[in-house]
Image: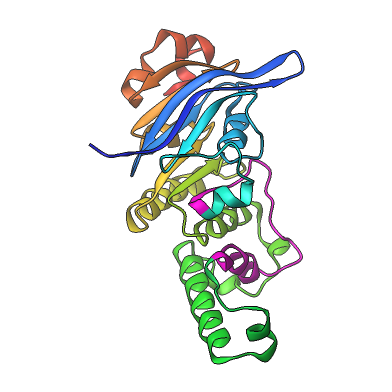
Amino acid sequence: MSAKLLEAKSITMQFGGLKAVDSLSFHINQGELVGLIGPNGAGKTTVFNMLTSVYKPTSGEVIFLSEPTVSLKPYQVARKGMTRTFQNIRLFKDLTVLENVLIGGTKDISYGFFSSILQTSKYFQQEKALKEKAIELLAIFGLEKKAHAPASALPYGEQRKLEIIRALATQPKLICLDEPAAGMNHQETHQLMETIAKIRKDFRLTVLLIEHDMKLVMGICERIIVLDHGVKIEEGSPQVIQSSPKVIEAYLGAEDIH
């Protein structure tokens, strides 16, 4: 049995009198692809924000790689190996496509300030390796020919892909994808499904996915956690979720989850 990579223990997020997430507990095993679903306002993105230390839970604990992370800053969580994309795209749009990916890969750079100023051999070696890796990642998503284009010039769907690529450049152990198919058409969504499955296998990643496209979720996730009003109402395989009366009621009809 795979080891637990991430564990949320009774995490709660309260904003004034509103409990956005209420005593939520779940775990993710190493190598799993898990979906987190629920109606709008269910608290899904708030969960991502707590897991990645954007928000500090009002109560409860987040354990990643057997260590608590609540006291860490978001960049420290990323350095430990948990990275994410955002529901609203957050690219550096004034930089090129390649430069956005290079920023994601800088955590493993070991040359110092003076090496960069003097442009030593160590500087050139690491910069060359970083750029080659970035181009390889862009090629997986078919964006290598647009490496030198401004990120702002990409169509919406490709900007979504670039955000995933930048997250991959950090060499994560766990990647949290917040609605990666948002704004994509049916063909793009199908390609994204295949790509997520491929990067998970090739990079030996663990994936936590928020997504409203139920065909995508049911097609690639092995286990699904369902939230409603900040509370977990169901957890299990796609088959269990599709037949759950609680889930069907939360989504106001069985046709929405098939």
User: 86 or 47, which is in the foreground?
Assistant: 47
Q: Where is residue 98? Give x, y as percent.
A: 61, 71
In this picture, residue 12 sits left or right of residue 235? right
In the rendered image, residue 95 lying in the magenta stretch gets the answer yes
Residue at 40% in and 30% down = 27
Which part of the image, by quadrant, shows the C terminus?
top left
Q: Where is residue 67? Give x, y as percent.
A: 46, 40
Residue at 42% in and 8% down = 245
Which part of the image, by quadrant, shows the N terminus?
top left
Q: Quadrant of residue 234?
A: top left
User: 34 or 56, which is in the foreground?
Assistant: 56
Q: Which residues are magenta?
A: 80-107
State whether residue 10 is above or below residue 56. above
Residue at 33% in and 19% down = 240
In the rendered image, residue 157 lying in the magenta stretch gets the answer no
State whether residue 169 is above or below residue 73. below
Q: Where is residue 145? Give x, y as percent.
A: 56, 74
Q: Where is residue 224? Give x, y as percent.
A: 41, 27
